[in-house]
Amino acid sequence: MAKPVRGLRFQPSGGSRAAQIPVGKKQRLTIERLANDGRGIAFLEGRTWFVVGALAGEEVEARVLGAHGKVVEARTERVFSASDLRRPAPCAHAGRCGGCSVQHLPHNEQLALKQRMLAEQLSRVAGVEPEEWAAPLSGPEFGYRRRARVAVRWDAKAKKLEVGFRAAGSQDIVAIDECPVLVQPLQPIMSRLPAMLQRLSKPQALGHVELFSGSAIAVLLRHMAPLSAADLEILQAFCAFHEAQLWLHGEGEPQPVDPGQALGYRLEPWNLQLAYRPGDFVQVNAGVNEAMVAQALEWLAPQADERVLDLFCGLGNFALPLAQKVREVVAVEGVATMVARAAENAASNNLHNTRFFQADLSQPLSDAEWAREGFSAVLLDPPRDGAFEVVRKLASLGAKRLVYVSCNPATLARDTVELVRQGYRLKRAGILDMFPQTAHVEAMALFEAS
């Protein structure tokens, strides 16, 4: 038998593989430009670096968060040469908390970034530009967020309960004692929440906490084991002190401790009250939400004798204001519990010209009973993956006007290609600044049949 040869290393065809960059490594970089998500882009030794917290033209020290292939994700640790645009981060947790990635940019520059992101997607993917750009819809840049999910995790090794928000680029939890983007009624709850949770007897059984401020303030606790009487007393005392409802989420759906309490939010311009339960989808920015609904109604221009379709209707955020202006609203949603809640919201607001249906809107529109009569206008507000299967059939419904509310410019641009193919033209588009201090872009587009 031949003696085995030891100590040889064989390279795969195609040459040697570059050594991977370890997480935590620090690297000095020159930032060339901004990516569409607001991160700085740098190029070094054949790799592309995406750096959170960096601006074009800056020289920074970045810490590696992760690397795959020739792409490196990092965050800014130190700025050697700052851009003229840079401002001091308003939040003490900047750079560690993953929530507000562009707070080092002045608000007007944040809006300009989001506008460029939307315009680039429409131009590059769909090859179109709207006939008219609308001014950005925006509100206060701080104190706007009425809903927040707080991460809670028991660290068995350190025997410590971690409470806060997820860190940038990892699953680590950053302890938060103050969050400038939360609405004021939630600020004292956020600051006192960690100390209260640490008093509970089974911290390892705690999930997350959800905070909400609407017609009432609510605190929901997710728990994986039954709560003791003493723990329940601690939670109730905490909520009583903050004049907040206590909701618990064990097995089944979230439930209020006091079943007689009502929770929801108002659409003040239309004198509407919508019921809400923790876990339901709701726009977190109340002021921009109202401005968004008003703009959607203005662009859609619904007439009193029209039948209008609202797709991805949620709790009725658009459907109920629409129902005040038209003959009939047909509203469709994929989640059955939301359909039921929306129907209850219509009834409680004395709106009887609305019909609500459950349907899987990720699939092509079939010959549903509610679609047979056709519609004069359509409003849709899909999730991030867009509404491609839905828009493929919109022209067959006879709609002459379509308002598309998007939370992802990439899927809006993709769906625009299909709408243009069906004979619609992009009349108007603009951004909705639903999440100041982040690079998240919401947009609204008006299409009209040619």
Image: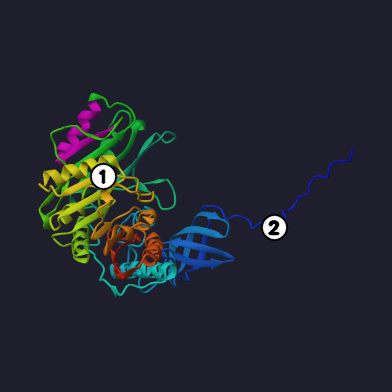
**The one of 284 and 276 positioned closer to us in this rendering:** 276
Residue furthest top as drawn: 229
Circle 2: residue type: Ser
In the figure, residue 120 lies in which quadrant?
bottom left
Magenta span of residues: 230-249
Give the quarter of the figure containing the N terminus: top right
Among the two numbered marks 1 and 2 on one chain, the one whose residue lies closer to the N terminus: 2
- Residue type, mark 1 in image: Phe
Q: Mark 2 points at which residue?
A: 16
Q: In which quarter of the image is residue 299?
A: bottom left
Instruction: Report x, y in % for residue 257.
Output: 19, 32
Mark 1 is surrounded, within 10 Å at the Cα level, by few (under 14), some (14 to 19) or many (20 or more) other residues, namely many
11 part of magenta stretch: no
The residue carrying mark 1 is 357
Crowd around label 2: few <14 · some 14–19 · many ≥20 (10 Å): few
Using the numbered discs, state the Cα–Cα distance from disc 1 to disc 2 in whole angstroms: 58 Å
Report the predominant secondary structure element of the magenta stretch: helix
Q: In this view, does 38 lie to the left or right of 199?
A: right
Label 1 sits on a secondary structure element that is: strand
Q: Which residue is drawn at 26% across and 35% down?
A: 254
